[in-house]
Amino acid sequence: MQSGADKARIDARIWDIFGEDWCVMFTDLAGFSRHVAEFGIIHFLQTVYESERLLIPVIEDHDGILLKVEGDSMLVIFRNAAKALQCAVTMQKVTEVYNSVRNKEDQVLLCIGLGYGRVLRIGDVDVYGAEVNAASKLGEDRAEAGDILTTGGFREQCGDAPGLRFESLDEVPAGCTAAYRVVCSPRKSV
């Protein structure tokens, strides 16, 4: 910020020290503001607790690192994009089973955004970068309950996944070149 500072050199040093390639996952629970207003804060906290109880073991099983939880959202990083995608699909399946025996107001309605690329990783505390911002926008603002949305960078890194396809989205968040919805192929009858 000082006058005459070589900002390009300073930026390059910061990226050299903290820059790493990671898959970034943002989760969010759909309809929370409405539910808090309608059912109260205790109900909100119980649903957040249930989501963490259900989803954190899935994250750990797929080698994810949970960096932080803020309200009804989680920030998770993965080294392997294919494992991140498997984790996201499993998380949606776990919530689907959980929700099948719950009243509508007690359901965990999960939204997921995935990005992949160069980020600034600050220990096990936070990450910053264009793919972080795009994954956040996809998971928290754009996704609806049950959605897994990805950036183009994630799609390129992940490649094809058996039983899944990537459907292009018209609206692309700032900082990425493309965005996709992950669609599970219908199961074939045996």
Image: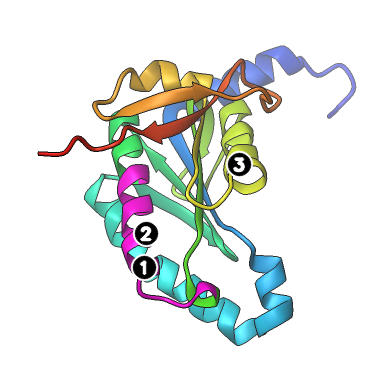
Give the residue at x 41% y 33%. 183
Q: Is residue 55 visible?
A: no
Which tag is nearer the camera, tag 2 or tag 3?
Answer: 2
Give the residue at x 41% y 53%. 66
Against 11, residue 56 (above or below) is below
Say if mark 1 contacts mark 2, CB within 8 Å: yes
The answer to if 66 sits in the magenta stretch is no
Q: Which of the 4 image quarters holds residue 120? A: top right
Q: Amino acid at mark 2?
A: Glu
* Magenta region: 88-104
Where, quadrant-wise, is the N terminus in this rendering? Answer: top right
The image shows residue 143 at horizontal and vertical percentages of 59, 43
Q: Is residue 100 visible?
A: yes
Closest to the observer, 133 or 184:
184
Q: Which residue was labeled with disc 3? A: 136
As drawn, the label of residue 96 is 2
Determine the main secondary structure of the stretch shown in magenta. helix
Q: Amino acid at mark 1?
A: Ser
The image shows residue 53 at horizontal and vertical percentages of 35, 70
